[in-house]
Amino acid sequence: MYVANLVNRIFNEYLALDWPSLLLAGITPEVLLRLGLAALAGGLLGIERERRGRAAGLRTTLLVCLAACMAMILSDSFYQQSLARYPTGGGSHPDPARLAAGVLSGMGFLGAGVIIREGNHIVRGVTTAAAIWFVTIIGLAFGAGAIGVGIVATLLSLLILAVIPALESMIQHDQYSDLTVWHLPSECPLEKVIEVLKPLKVIVTGTDLVEELNDRACRSTFHLIYKRRGMADLAGSIAGAVRQLPGVSRISFQS
């Protein structure tokens, strides 16, 4: 009987609560504006990443930006509530920046998950990881009420992701590749390969030699560095030059 009366009393107390006020507590036009702008910014950046076929696309970027915005809104709300509870300065007040710092630290793990290593030298996903980290800061800016900063940051990030790739393609940066040559043990083409690569402006930075004693075969791997240009033409030129060397039975080129 006691338990039934207790449950009935709790149920009546819950019914007596002002549920509309509780559900809408903290939801103001300014909060809705912050969330809406964060969703818009995350969506725009997500569409750009989705269009390029990246691992973190529209849904990921949108959720990250909204989550960061909500975290900052809640952090600021906790701080304001503590000030209202102790208006004379007594008690302790939570630091609004602590939750933001925790959010940024957590984004490091998410960003590391989209970085993919392909082959020996190519690493993909670094820009996407940076975009996730950046969109988190945009969400924190909107959540903190820095609407102007968030809008400018969103426009600048879209400009960077749209324009910079075209500029990067005009820069001849260093490219790294591996050339593997299978040859007879009696023919050691290390010096010969280096010589035939010099006219192609390809520099050998290191070599690895593996000799199979049972199969009487050798495998030499050359680590190359050169200025990026037509990859297909360069690979064909390297293969054509090395193919002419005596004792070479197989060639592999990995960039």
Image (cartoon, rainbow, N blue to C red):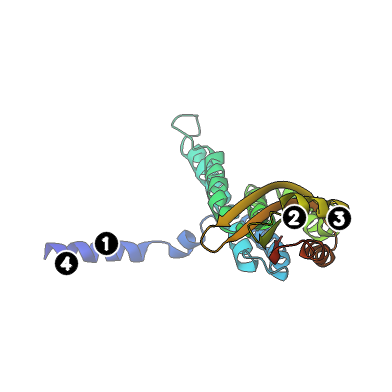
**In this figure, which residue is indicated by the disc labeled 3?**
200
Residue 110 is situated, as x and y percent measured from the top left of the image, at 55, 55
Secondary element under disc 4, as helix, strand or loop, is helix
**Crowdedness near tag 2: few (<14), some (14–19) or many (≥20) residues, C-alpha within 10 Å:** many
Q: Distance from label 2 to label 1 (Cα)?
A: 48 Å
User: Which residue is at the front of the view, 83 or 59?
Assistant: 59
Label 4 vs label 2, nearer the camera: 2
* Relative side of 142 to 23, left or right: right
Residue bearing mark 2 = 154
Q: CA distance from mark 4 to mark 2?
A: 57 Å
Q: Nearer the viewer, residue 123 or 40?
A: 123
Asked if 180 appears above or below 173 in the picture, the reply is below
First along the sequence among labels 4 and 1? 4
Q: Which residue is mark 4?
A: 4
Residue 147 appears anywhere in the view: yes
Disc 4, disc 1: CB below 8 Å?
Answer: no
Q: CA distance from mark 1 to mark 3?
A: 84 Å
Residue 49 percent across, percent down from the top left: 70, 64
2 or 1: tag closer to the N-terminus: 1
Q: Disc 1 or disc 3, which is closer to the eye? A: 3
| Callouts 4 and 3 close, C-beta under 8 Å | no
Residue at 15% x, 63% y is 3
Q: CA distance from mark 4 to mark 3?
A: 89 Å
Q: Residue at x 62, y 49 (%)?
A: 140
Answer yes or no: is residue 121 visible: no
Asked if marks 2 and 1 touch (Cβ < 8 Å), the reply is: no
Q: Amino acid at mark 4?
A: Ala
Q: What residue is shown with label 1?
A: 10
- Locate residue 47: give its quadrant: bottom right
Label number found at residue 127? none
